[in-house]
Image: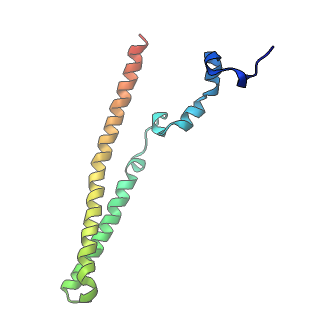
Amino acid sequence: MEMALEDIALGDQSRSQSHDFLTESTIFSLSRSESLWTTASRSTWETYNKPIIVMSVGGAVLIFGMVLSGLWFGNIYPKSTNILGPGFFSIGLMILVVGLVWVPVMREKQKQKSVSRLFTNHKHIFLHL
């Protein structure tokens, strides 16, 4: 009498039967990070695009705040530029600093990732001896 696959308890399944359900694509789709499974290095733009965009936006807001502050010191539109100039200036400066700090953080993260890859590769070599 044959038993259907659904009727077999998990403890009764052989290793090959349970391994057939876990394919490489299933493991890849269940992983949180694609970088754990791929070894291709990312380009510089892919690595630093977000900090560059943040720095560009911060610089633009900073310059806009400087222009508004200059208009206030020149007594051109003093009511509207009284608060807006220093406000845009400080917000732009904060965003620019966040972008500038983000770059070394990304470099350190890349360095740690390369060291951990190197360590895992050597660990596998020692385990197979």
Work out which residue is located at the far top of the displayed protein and give it.
129
Q: Is residue 91 visible?
A: yes
Work out which residue is located at the far right of the displayed protein and give it.
1
Q: Is residue 110 above or below residue 98?
A: above
Q: Residue at x 55, y 32 (%)?
A: 27
The image quarter containing residue 12 is top right
Q: Residue at x 40, y 23 (%)?
A: 121
Left or right: 129, with 72 as reference point: right
Quarter of the image that includes the N terminus: top right
Q: Nearer the viewer, residue 15 or 103?
A: 15
Left or right: 50, with 34 as reference point: left
Q: Is residue 12 above or below residue 74?
A: above
The image quarter containing residue 96 is bottom left
Residue 54 x, y percent position in the rendering? 35, 60
Quarter of the image that includes the C terminus: top left
Residue 118 x, y percent position in the rendering? 36, 27
